[in-house]
Image (cartoon, rainbow, N blue to C red):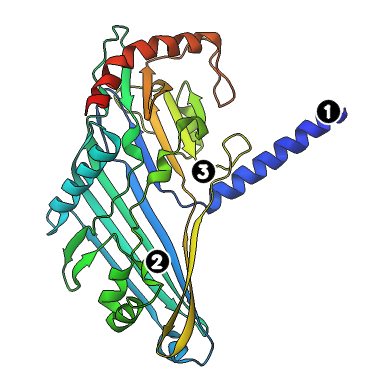
Amino acid sequence: MNSFRFIMIIFLITFTVTTISSNVYAAQMTTVLSPQLNQAQPVFTANRFITFQFDQGSELAKKYANVDQTVRFKANSSTPGMAELISGINRDISTQKQSPISIENGTIDYTGSLKGSADRLIISYKVVFTPSISGFTLPSNNTGGASLVDLDWRGFHTTRPLELQIPNIGNMSINYPMSLLQVTYPELAKQLNSTQAKEIFQTPLFNFDDIGTPMDRWHFLFDPTGSQASTAGSGFQELGGSRVVSIYSLGESSFREGVMEAKESDAKATIDGTNANIHSSTPPPSGQIQIGGFATVSKSGNSEIAYVSANAPEGTATATGGFPLQVLGILGGMMAAVSVFVLWKARK
């Protein structure tokens, strides 16, 4: 009886932590991959919050207490600068990850907001990048009908400014936080550039390195019918004729997967004779990868590759927590199948 009560307490704590954490985390990457189609549109979302805190009645308070302004725009292939943006990110992914994927097109949805109050100015950034990618299904020497899927591309960063020409705004970097101030309050941006807070505003938004967290820290759910994914509201899509789906989720902060933490930094600045404390916060990483078919992930060096078959072996666990012997046998076969590709990546 005592053992049962202990197990129930642990379960409730785990469920509560997972549920609360999932609700407050900003989704930073979601994608649905079909090995048969070999094309996808992942969604990368960069979020950040920067807060100026100052004394009430100060010069900064007089200037910014009543600020309520939002810069919002969309960009696509016809936007000046978009081709260079895509080309640059392609080079970064190839250099950092040796991934064979190619971004062929993409869209940007940018929102930057400034909201003032009596003792602070809060600046928030949300940049949604939706690329059209192909090439993640890899060549394989496997003859059993299974596919190999490259997963390394998911975690990348870029220090490029990613500048776009936006109507009624002008030239704007979607990667550097300072650019929002340069188009809204250029005098404030100029003063910040001569303070230690400059680094906060020059830290790129497009840093998805944490999405590259090893897949063994992602929660795994295998749904043999797709029904669980559909009813759970996960956005499951039937692609490439597959109803079987493997779902990997990052950011649940469970006991097994660990705790994902926000990235925070602080600085001080004197602006218009007013001392200000500046705090930057980037939400913890989170993401979801849905793969059509039964997927098992293998790691070789720094590379992670999913071995995807149409059906799961009998007795396969439907969630993280262990695999039956049949799956372990598949992992052995998968290593032979990916060996050629791993050698190819090593030579790049």
The relative height of residue 99 versus residue 107 in the rendered view (above or below) is above
- Element marked by disc 1: helix
Q: Nearer the viewer, residue 252 or 281?
A: 281
Residue at x-position 23% and y-position 22%: 344
What type is the residue that disc 1 sits on? Answer: Ser
The relative height of residue 312 versus residue 178 in the rendered view (above or below) is above
Foreground tag (3 vs 2): 2
Residue 107 in view: yes
| Residue density around tag 3, few if under 14, some if 14–19, many if 20 or more, within 10 Å | many
The picture quadrant where one finds residue 177 is bottom left
Q: Which residue is mark 1?
A: 3
Residue 146 in view: no
In the rendered image, the quadrant that contains the C terminus is top left
The relative height of residue 79 versus residue 136 in the rendered view (above or below) is below
Q: Are marks 3 and 2 in contact (CB under 8 Å)?
A: no
Residue at x-position 31% and y-position 18%: 147
Disc with the residue nearer the chain's start (2 vs 1): 1
In the rendered image, the quadrant that contains the N terminus is top right
Foreground tag (2 vs 1): 2
The mark found on residue 251 in the picture is 3
Q: Position of residue 259 (x, y in %)?
A: 58, 44
| Residue density around tag 2, few if under 14, some if 14–19, many if 20 or more, within 10 Å | many
Disc with the residue nearer the chain's start (3 vs 2): 2
Q: Position of residue 72 (x, y in %)?
A: 29, 67
Left or right side of 184 for 288: right
Q: Which residue is mark 2?
A: 200
